[in-house]
Image (cartoon, rainbow, N blue to C red):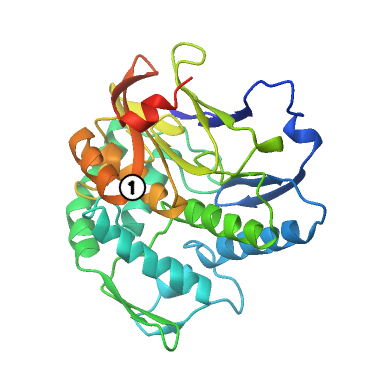
Amino acid sequence: MKKKLNVLLLTPMLLASCALKPIEETQTPISVLAFGSFFTCKYMATSGEAGREVFDFVTKVDMLADPYTDYMGVNNLYRINRTHEAVKVDQVLFELIKQSIDLKEKTEGNFNPFMGKITSLWKTTLFGAEYDLDFTGPTASSINEAKALIPALLEEMNGTNVELDEANLTVKRIGDGYIDLGGLTKGYSVEKVERILERYNVSSYLVNGGQSSLGLGKGPNGGPFKVNLMYSKEENENSFSLSEIDTSTSAIYEQFATVDGVTYSHIINPNTGLPLTDYSMAFLSGEDSALLDAFSTSCMIAGPEKSEEWAKKYNFTYSLYSDEGGFTKLVAESDKLTKARI
């Protein structure tokens, strides 16, 4: 049966301090319905100009990276996926696709932007088609029907690539797989919004990219943030003191369905084409939100040894969890992140 938890994977709060005012009383809030969630930004500034630019940028990325909707007069991901001709695109979408190819290589294929058809198949199988009010949940039969399609879709995915012409800003899809940037757009947008805020000399901010990606500046008066991970068995079991850093979280708890005792989540393993992982949550922190977004899912798929290798190579910290009765159980963690625990 479908189960979607409407709670944040990350709960950022200010560390208790008499010198700090509540962040809500001193900041300008911006909220955008994007990427299937709410993208929010709170920041300390005397002008609303930064907020208007943030709103416009996030709205633009949401439209350009949409693989399901055709917008009149807009060459977005939907249009690229419906042709094998070169498509002239906006600089933002070109950069996003280019970065997705780079991250596919860095994650050794554990992040794959060409698995759009596989993602769409499982989304419909597990959670129903959009506006399907009669959907009552997946069954053993519907799961098996989806699994039967996976070998052909994997072959199609692995045979797909893109030709990028940076001089002309064109993207040409080679092969029949569909591009899906859902595992990157939130992190990419958080990173770009932070750069927008910096241009307006904003250093105190909290950017929440829709439940899973955070961009943390300084708290009011320079204080750090307290970040709590949800799905911990004990209160404050997984709490971290963080400042001027980005975080990304991937977890099976956000959207999942259980059929015949097997839990299928919205996180798809591009190596198998199946919505199954051995780990229930990954929490990463570092300086590049886009990179963290792709690697948080990849660490769940690849496990602790590969996570440790990637963390050292690409300068991020991580904690990896398994599931224990619906709660997280720590499996492995970077030393630096352990020291940030409170």
Residue 76 visible in image: no
39 or 69, nearer to the observer: 39
Could you tell me which residue is drawn at 64 percent across and 33 percent down? 223
230 or 247, nearer to the observer: 247
- The correct choice, above or below, for 279 with respect to 184 in the image is above
- The correct choice, above or below, for 125 with respect to 195 in the image is above
Residue 184 appears at what percent x and percent y? 43, 54
Residue at which label 1 appears:
315
56 or 289, nearer to the observer: 289
Residue 276 appears at what percent x and percent y? 27, 36
Indicate the amino acid at tag 1: Asn
285 or 272, nearer to the observer: 285
Could you tell me which residue is drawn at 30 percent across and 50 percent down? 314
The answer to which quarter of the image holds residue 176 is bottom left
The outermost residue toward the bottom is 168
Residue 146 appears at what percent x and percent y? 27, 45
